[in-house]
Image: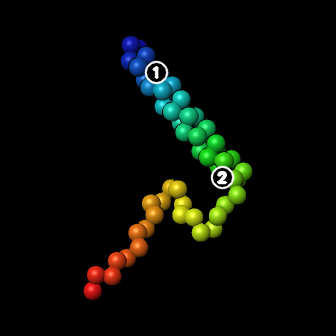
Amino acid sequence: MAGRGPQTFKKRQKEQERKERQEEKRARRLQRKLEPRDPDAPDEDQPAESEPSDEA
């Protein structure tokens, strides 16, 4: 049963990464909830679309 060591370590690493991402998401949600939202401001998650230029 020598194969069990690395798998357990990988599982723990994955679990730690998952918890870390979960905590980051929770912090972002809380931050959004606490900050007043400007309806005209672009979303931080999505890149802002540039204005179409009139080349014609």
In the image: residue 44, left or right of residue 29: left
Q: How crowded is mark 2: few (under 14 residues within 10 Å), some or many (20 or more)?
A: few
Q: What element carries label 1?
A: helix
Q: Which of 7 and 19 is in front in this view?
A: 19
Q: Which of 24 and 40 is in front in this view?
A: 40
Residue position for label 1:
9
Identify the residue at the far left of this view.
Answer: 56
Q: Which amino acid does label 2 sit on?
A: Arg
Q: Quadrant of residue 6?
A: top left
Q: Residues within 10 Å of mark 1 (few under 14, many from 20)?
A: few
Residue position for label 2:
32
Q: Position of residue 3 (x, y in %)?
A: 38, 18
In which quadrant is the N terminus drawn?
top left
In the image: residue 2, left or right of residue 18: left
Q: Position of residue 25 (x, y in %)?
A: 59, 44
Q: What residue type is labelled 1?
A: Phe
User: N-terminal of the two: label 2 or label 1?
Assistant: 1
